[in-house]
Amino acid sequence: MLSYVGLSLLVLLSAMEAATVERVEYDYYKYHTMPEITKWMDQVEKDNPDVVTIVEYGQTYEKRVIRLLKIGLNTGEKKKAIWMDCGIHAREWIAPAFCQYFVRQILQAHKTDPKMQEMIKNMDFYVTPVLNMDGYIYSWKDDTTRLWRKNRSPGPPDCNSYGTDLNRNFDANWGTLGVSFNCSSETYCGSQAVSEPEAQAVTYFVGSRKDDFLCFLTIHSYGQLLLVPYGHPNFTAANYNELMGVGLGAADAIRSVHGKNYTVGTSPDVLYANSGSSRDWARFQGIPYSYTFELRDKGTFGFQLPEDQIQPTCEEAYSGALHIITYAHDKTFNGAVATAAATLWTMLLTVGVTGTTLM
């Protein structure tokens, strides 16, 4: 009898240990290599077959398959959608870390939170953890490549340098300002608009479904900014006031988590003018809520944000992203409530009463 009890206890302890190992197996608060992220994506799909599907939608220059996680309930009907991509710039490691955290959070929330259950029923989330896979892998090579920004396509025949800045390569006032035609530059915009396979993949996938998408969120670092269209100072989004109102609400949500201030505005107003960004392209396509998140910090560590800041950065950014997504959802599926909130923010913006200071 004692032998049986001892064996049973041993089996129970082994099971508990296995469960503990499984729970801590993937650390969301450290930076992961591309193979680790790929394996994580496979596991997420395996663990959540009712709501998660991996979608392949392109190839990088080095022939790696670009994949995203599609998260949503299959209702058998055409659904609205949310886009999020991370890692368009290789060195911005906090961005892929956030995409992974975001996926975990919405999958956990949909099990118990009625609001998330409603949103996953009404919308599909398309999340690309690492868009610039070639560049991201290269940034992990050694200390000399850690700050690589661009993709890894070769330059023109008369150029010995590699890489195009993917966030200058989209067909949105391409090549007009805030770019370089010097192939050695970090902001080299490519030989023509959408010359790069990674930009082509997003352009086709999102562009062919542009009427479905409510939000286009592209995650970067650093600077603690929420950027609205457009990067060109001669262009103003038709819904600029609404974008600012929703952005200011998101900045307040971010600040409420760990006290960090995010500045909201167009790139020319709060950062620098540019052209060819995916954010601007998405708004030109008619996607109403298009934002660039520039995560922590403000320059102390820059692109090399320490791992001990991953958790707070992700927690606050999740709050901000969720504010924008919830607004877009509620305006679409429950218009009156969201419109009233937007009107309030627009009034506050007009009279200059806000907790967020613009540069």
Image: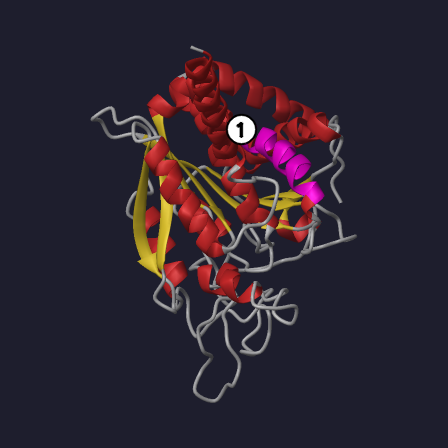
In percent of width and height, residue 248 lies at: 65, 31
The amino acid type, in three-letter code, at marker 1 is Leu
Q: Residue at x 66, y 44 (%)?
A: 225
The residue positioned 28% from the left and 47% from the top of the image is: 208
- Name the residue at 39% across, 18% down: 118
User: What residue did someone put label 1 on?
Assistant: 322
- Tell me, yes or no, if residue 234 can be seen here: yes
Q: Quadrant of the C terminus?
A: top right
Question: Which residue ends up furthest to the right in the rendered image?
Answer: 300
Up-down: is 311 above or below 34?
above
Measured from the top left, where is residue 12 in percent x and y? Answer: 46, 20
Closest to the observer, 110 or 216: 110
Q: Does residue 229 appear in this view?
A: no
Percent of width and height locating residue 277: 51, 56
Q: Residue at x 71, y 49 (%)?
A: 306
Residue closest to the far bottom = 158
The front one of 8 and 234 is: 8
Which SS type dominates the magenta stretch? helix
Q: Quadrant of the N terminus?
A: top left
List x then y, in percent, for residue 31. 59, 49
- Does residue 75 belong to the magenta stretch? no
For residue 98, above or below residue 190: above
Q: Is residue 355 left or right of residue 48?
A: right
Q: Residue furthest top?
A: 1
Q: Quadrant of residue 45?
A: top left
Give SS at disc 1. helix
